[in-house]
Amino acid sequence: MGEALLEVENLHVHFPTPDGVVQAVNGISYSLGKKEILAIVGESGSGKSVGVLSLLRLIPARDCKVQGSVNFEGQNLLKLSDPEMRELRGNRIAMVFQDPMTSLNPVLRIGDQIQESVIEHQGISEKIAKSRAIELLELVGIPEAGKRYRHYPHQFSGGMRQRIMIAAGLACEPSILIADEPTTALDVTIQAQIIDLVKKLRREIGMSVIWITHDLGIVAGLADRVAVMYAGKIVEFAPVDQLFKTPQHPYSRGLLNSLPRLDARSEKPLEAIEGLPPNLINYPASCPFLERCSYQTEQCQIPPEMRSITTTHEVCCHHTEKL
Amino acid sequence: MTEPIVKVKNLSMHFGQASGFFSGPQRLVKAVDNVNLEVFEGETLGLVGESGCGKSTLGRSILQLCKPTTGTVQYRGTDLVKLEGKALRKMRNRFQMIYQDPYASLNPRMKIADIIGEPMYIHQLHPRSEIRSEVEKILKMVGLARDFADRYPHEFSGGQRQRIGIARALAAQPDFIVADEPISALDVSIQAQIINLMRNLQQQLKLTYLFIAHDLAVVRHISDRMAVMYLGKVMELTDSNTIYEDPLHPYTQSLLAAIPIPDPEKEREREANRVLLDGEVPSPENPPEGCAFCTRCPRKREVFETKKIDCSTKAPTFAEAKPGHWTACHLYT
Ligand SMILES: Nc1ncnc2c1ncn2[C@@H]1O[C@H](COP(=O)(O)OP(=O)(O)O)[C@@H](O)[C@H]1O
Ligand SMILES: Nc1ncnc2c1ncn2[C@@H]1O[C@H](COP(=O)(O)OP(=O)(O)O)[C@@H](O)[C@H]1O
Ligand code: SF4
Ligand SMILES: [Mg+2]
Ligand SMILES: [Mg+2]
């Protein structure tokens, strides 16, 4: 990996609530290289969404307490003013969500929505913007883009809406696309089309991607590097081949073993990880995985630090040597 | 092979009215269209397909939770479609359903003991005085503590609620269970717990499952045989290993190719010769005239060239292409 485009350092996001403080993200650090696809994988509630939403300050400041730093093009995003942040969002960094209807305006023709963001970010004439918008719709594979340009969001299927969202995100030629479970609500054949599209965009326009998912199959086929999250921490960070071949954290290993495989039938029961993730309000003082871990010892009462086991592979566990 | 416990013949479930004299264009959804299959005693038949293809409707019409438009469903020799009212109610405990969202299907104001005890009481399976101890027995069977009986559904995690949903189904003493995406709403590490549980219960209690899911890897793991649906029709049916190793129907082939495998090396290999399916599933209100898959099929030209059959006007029949391997495609007729 070349030089880092984005560097997240020791990010914490806590939500004070009447029941106590929800420790959603607890000191995550990672970097994203140019043209790199980074996958963030973890179960629901592990802090994947909060972790990226807070990078773009998309969580209202009154709801949460954010600490750490996010370096992008020489600036700390957490220190930008609101207008500066708005300028950057959707301009240098675009985001796509699981449900595209939440970010498309239902009463505006989709062409106008894309055209608007082209004009806003590139300051070009309406006529050029229109042909640019049609180009973008073609790029993301909307058939008959010239005609469909005039349609409203509800006239498209879920997969098509997700393509439109990506087109809108690309309008400003961002250097990073953040995609939060963009295919979770889609069928597999449509999911395959969207993944193929994102790979093509990375190849052709050289954008970097942070792709959030809970599906290890998608990770295997798409990512260059992978961060595995558990209870608001990155517990393992590795290039994709290393993670799948030699997972070092008991949780990553457990996840991989618990998956039924399409390509190999086994009569053996799946190796389930028993128990549940910890309560984020009463965050454990020990290793957060301790309760479910079969490798635990006395030492695990002290939370482990992230440490490098090779130049590219980091793990947050006291007992990697046992695996 | 053992005997079929359920035999589904020419089963269709069409929603909406065919157009009358004055009504506008016909809006008929052929959610399930002329399905034929058998489920054998003690087996798990997996049912897969993309959302909206009719899996739930097929499961529901087999269990008579909706009355099929046409066709028969023989359960141990009795045609359930013909049964009405009391006669049907009397048999109902024998076949049960497990739902995707156990929370939506559990009454939030009832204690777990009452949720699980209700079917025992309704079907008079135990004397009233013994219901509590039977509930505790079943809780234990599904891996829940006895004192959960006095708590309410909202106090439980998704995986625990699914165990409660399973316990409620078991309380009726069924021998045939339709499980409709029972793990789709759960996290990966919890999915494995529920899959293992369902397999153990099947062996212990000699249950027969129709297991509905859209995740083919899960279905392959749990099923003996598998049926693949598309637009209301069963496209292919055979044993689970054969579906993966020798898929015949072009839709099954495309579906398998689209499913990511958690192995980066394999994914790179597959990507090199992956043919992605174009387009989307047509609306079930307006399905293609010929083969349901013809609008997306990569092999329809081959059929035309080698067999002089036009897939977009002539529908294939569901037939046995190889022993025990059924499919609906002109390539094999
Ligand atoms: N506004 C909020 N107030 C309180 N807790 C929140 C808020 N937003 C998210 N959380 C909590 O933060 C944790 C992490 O959530 P999230 O990042 O959405 O998880 P993921 O995307 O991995 O499923 C969850 O426990 C969630 O309930
Ligand atoms: N009660 C109903 N009335 C009208 N249409 C229905 C009804 N139930 C299901 N459908 C339609 O039937 C088709 C199949 O639905 P369903 O069986 O739920 O599919 P799946 O379970 O495979 O996702 C869909 O087009 C759905 O909209
Ligand atoms: S630190 Fe200990 S408890 Fe935590 S994952 Fe490693 S072995 Fe398990
Ligand atoms: Mg999320
Ligand atoms: Mg369904």
Image (spheres, helix red, strand yellow):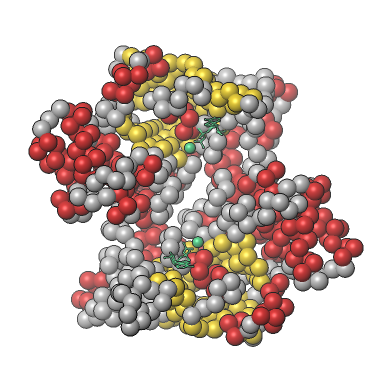
Q: Nearer the viewer, residue A320 or B313?
A: B313
Q: Nearer the viewer, residue B74 or B115?
A: B115
**Residue B268 found in image quarter:** top left
Q: Residue at x 43, y 63 (%)?
A: B52
Compared to A268, does A96 lie above or below? above
- Percent position (x, y) of residue A266? 58, 56
Q: Nearer the viewer, residue A147 or B144?
A: A147
**Residue B284 found in image quarter:** bottom left
- Percent position (x, y) of residue B186? 57, 48
Tell me how many marks there are. Answer: 0
Q: Residue at x 19, y 38 (%)?
A: A115
Q: Quadrant of the C terminus of chain B?
A: bottom left
- Percent position (x, y) of residue B89? 69, 76
Q: Is residue B11 left or right of residue A201?
A: right
Q: Is residue A9 visible?
A: yes
Q: Quadrant of the N terminus of chain B?
A: bottom right
Q: Is residue A238 visible?
A: no
Q: Residue at x 47, y 76 (%)?
A: B13
- Percent position (x, y) of residue A147? 16, 53
Q: Residue at x 69, y 48 (%)?
A: B153
Q: Residue furthest right?
A: B129
Q: Is residue A122 left or right of residue B104?
A: left
Q: Residue furthest front?
A: B22
Compared to A57, does B97 lie above or below? below
**Residue B322 found in image quarter:** bottom left
